[in-house]
Amino acid sequence: MRVAVVLLLAIIAGAQNLTPLGTHTTANLRGVSAPSNTVVWASGTGGTYLRTTDAGQTWTVSRVPGAEQLDFRDVEAFNENVAYLLSAGPGAVSRIYKTNDGGSHWTLQLKNEDPRGFYDCMAFWDETHGIALGDSIDGEFQLFSTDDGEHWHQLPTNKLPTSLEGEGAFAASGSCIAVQGQSNVWFATGGKIARVYRSTDRGESWQVSDTALTHGLDSTGIFSIAFRDAKHGVIAGGDYQKPKQSGHNLAFTEDGGETWTLSSLAPQAYYSAAAYRPGGLLLVGTAGAALVTADSPTSTRLLHFWNANLNAVSLPPDGTAYAVGPKGLIVRIPR
């Protein structure tokens, strides 16, 4: 009963702070990237991307020419001009595009030629150095990197631990892979098992750790991974087909991803994306969004809850959050 009362009070206190932003699109949005306090990019179905340069007061909504049938599950932006888009799907519909002029022109940089392939997410250390993750083929996850922001090459698959049967990644929010510092990278999996792969040399070598996050079904596992420094990180997920079902959907690491401790937060829900912000951790999913403490996994507390259907979240430097959802939904959560 006490948990229910605390949750209700958090809903009342937090809901008034969530501000929907008019976007004039009905595309389902799963990617968002806020490189500054005023510039935000978002992406979604129908080859759609959105951009604002005035903190969401007005939005430019457009489609990448020739990509009208694609689903852009991830966007990584660096300013009002430079952004990358990743589309997810089987075979050739998995692609990476880049613009250097705010969307006036787009260049197709990478296209999946294997019908068994499926791109999931990407992350960047800086504007020209990034890494992208694709689902496993013949027991090997597909990883691609760029060193100049223009050309991509596949990383050797023999450097990766073999994936297990029924193990895959989720293209749910563009956050199934994370980078930190100059060379650290992690990616998370789900399905029959929930694991975290980690590398300290930009993917030249890898180690993998099991986690106790919810898994076992194709709809379960780790959907998002984030790090606030080289040692402290979080994984979040659950069962997207049962978004309100509580369980082991949140875990933390204090040793760079070698071991993971389940969060004590209760109740929990399905989280498709997680992002650190000053003073806590933001979690979003189709069952709502939550701000929780991130100091200790054994004493995680709920600070605020917002009743909203959301898929992905991004934070600019000032700590304001932008989150996206279905039917063109974009909301701003003040710091």
Image (tube, helix red, strand yellow):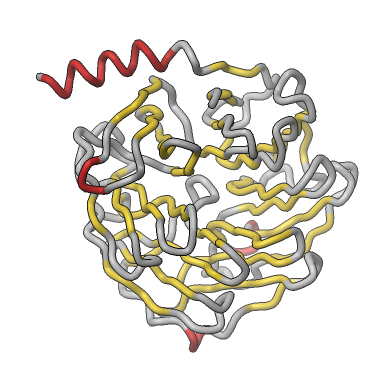
Residue lying farthest to the bottom in this orientation: 158
Q: Which x, y percent locates residue 130?
A: 66, 65
Place of residue 117 in the rendered image (x, y in percent of width and height, measured from the top left) = 54, 68
Number of callouts: 0
Hey, which residue is sitting farthest left in the picture? 1
Q: Residue at x 66, y 72 (%)?
A: 145
In which quarter of the view is residue 252 placed?
Answer: bottom left
Residue 319 shows up from this direction: yes
Whether residue 52 sits left or right of residue 27 in the image: it is: right
Q: Is residue 294 above or below residue 302?
A: below
Vertical order, 272 against 260 (above or below): above
Nearest the viewer among 89 and 102 is 102
Residue drawn at x 35%, y 11% is: 12
Is 82 in front, or is 139? 82
Which of the pair 191/178 is nearer the observer?
A: 178
Q: Could you tell me residue 290's position as x and y percent?
A: 38, 30
Q: Residue at 66%, 47% (x, y): give it.
A: 75
Can the viewer see residue 45 in this picture? no
Give 258 or 91, whichever is nearer the viewer. 258
Look at 38% across and 62% down and name the residue there: 189
Q: Position of residue 118 (x, y in %)?
A: 54, 62
**Where does the N terminus fall, quadrant-wise?**
top left
